[in-house]
Amino acid sequence: MNEHTTHQINTDSISDWSKWVMGLSLFSASGCTGILLTTGVRKANIVNIKLAILFFLATILIAWIVQFFVAVTKAYSSSKIETENEIIIVSNKTARRWLKPLVIGEIVTFTLSLLFLTIWIMKLPAKDTAPPAQQTAPFHSFNKSSDKKTDKAITLK
């Protein structure tokens, strides 16, 4: 295998992974948002689902940038490119330099989103940190022996 073929296999693998993780993250973020908006999440566990959504969205953004840089590196490695008719947005050197850190960032953000999603699932049903306050309703009665109005509270459970 020559260097061009190995590079092509690597960029194809990165592109396939990035497409897969982008679709999975979009599906997961949509599901988490649907749960957050319809059934609601208790206050004690809301941070975990919000962080999961945030990291899923960050993964989608990074995956989009990875796809762009993979396309740039494929375009530069192709021998059919006519350089005089090209519009260069990012140089090949820049795309190759940033591709590895972006793929690592994509893996880290996806892992963090799965971590927070797992924490949220493991805490179902989440209990709020403060117990629900007891509601009291004033009950007014007259004391027959002293003709004074006294306040008594009835506790509602």
Image (cartoon, helix red, strand yellow):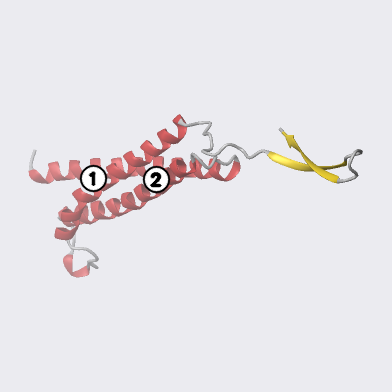
Q: Is residue 91 above or below residue 107?
A: below
Disc 2 and disc 1: Cα gap in Å? 15 Å
**In the rendered image, which quarter is residue 130 located in?**
top right
Q: Quadrant of the N terminus?
A: top left
Residue drawn where x is 53% and y is 37% of the image: 128
Q: Is residue 61 above or below residue 83?
A: above
In the depicted structure, whether residue 61 falls above or below residue 1: below
Q: Secondary structure at mark 2?
A: helix
| Closest to the observer, 155 or 43 | 155
Q: Could you classify mark 1 by the number of other residues whose Cα lies within 10 Å: few (under 14), some (14-19), or many (20 or more)? A: few
Q: Position of residue 33 (x, y in %)?
A: 51, 45
Residue 128 numbered tag: none
Dot placed on the residue nearer the N-terminal end, 2 or 1: 2
Instruction: Tell me residue 66's x, y (percent).
Output: 27, 51
Q: Secondary structure at mark 1?
A: helix
**Displayed quadrant of residue 146:** top right
Residue 144 drawn at (x, y percent): 92, 38
Residue under numbered circle 2: 56
- Residues 106 and 40: in front is 40
Residue flagged by tag 2: what amino acid is it?
Phe
Is there a contact, CB below 8 Å, between mark 2 and mark 1? no
Give the quadrant of the C terminus.
Answer: top right
63 to the left or right of 86: right
Q: Which residue is outermost to the front?
A: 146
Q: Position of residue 8 (x, y in %)?
A: 18, 45
Residue drawn at x 42%, y 37% as measured from the top left: 117
Q: Nearer the viewer, residue 36 or 156?
A: 156
Identify the residue at horizontal 53%, vertical 34% (top origin). Answer: 127
> Which amino acid does the dot numbered 1 rest on?
Ile
40 vs 81, left or right, is right
Residue sticking out furthest to the bottom: 84
Residue beneath disc 1: 104
